[in-house]
Structure formats: C-alpha cells, structure tokens
Image: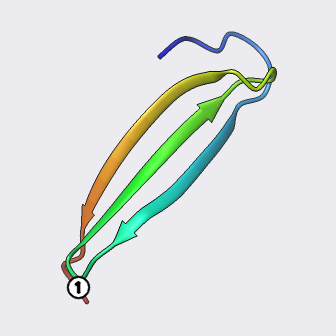
Amino acid sequence: MRPVKSGDVLITARIQRRGRDLVFGEIDMHDDAGELAAHATTTYALINK
C-alpha cells in the first residue's frame, strides 16, 4: 500500500467466486497515473439467503 496524495482515485471491486454460503472478492485502488496504490481481498458470509 502507498499513499495517494493528490488527484482522483479509481476503486475497482470484483467478485472472484460466489458459493452457496461465501462470496470471495478483490478490491484494487489506482491513482491518477494508473499505478496500483492498494489491493485487498475479502470474504463475505451469506446469512440471509
């Protein structure tokens, strides 16, 4: 991760896999120049189907 000190930020979120009970995703944050500033992965539990 690195700081973005000025300009716009583009956030992109993608679902990698959706199962019956869990959803796995990725999130990327890019600065104005298109350089990757941060990357995260996430897992969500589906409790109210």
Q: Position of residue 32 (x, y in %)?
A: 80, 24
Q: Of all residues shown, which one is farthest toward the bottom?
A: 49
Q: Is residue 26 left or right of residue 31?
A: left
Q: Which residue is at a point 50% across and 44% down the rendered structure image?
A: 27
**Which residue: 47% across, 32% down?**
39
In the image, 3: left or right of 20?
Answer: right
Position of 49 with respect to 6 (left or right) is left
Tell me the SS state at disc 1: loop
Task: Judge whether 23 appears above or below 2 on screen.
Answer: below
* Vertical relation: 43 (above or below) 8: below
Quarter holding the C terminus?
A: bottom left
Q: Is residue 25 left or right of residue 36?
A: left
Q: Which residue is mark 1?
A: 48
Vertical relation: 46 (above or below) 37: below
Q: Which class describes the residues within 10 Å of circle 1: few (<14), some (14-19), or many (20+)?
A: few
Residue 24 against residue 18 in the figure, above or below = above
Q: Which residue shows up at 81% across the image and 20% down it? A: 33
Residue at the far front in the pictured view: 17
Query: Measured from the top left, where is residue 16 in percent x and y?
Result: 43, 61
- x, y (%) of residue 1? 47, 17
Q: Residue at x 71, y 31 (%)?
A: 9
- Specify the quadrant of the image occupied by residue 25: bottom left
The total of numbered circles placed on residues is 1
Three-letter code, disc 1: Asn
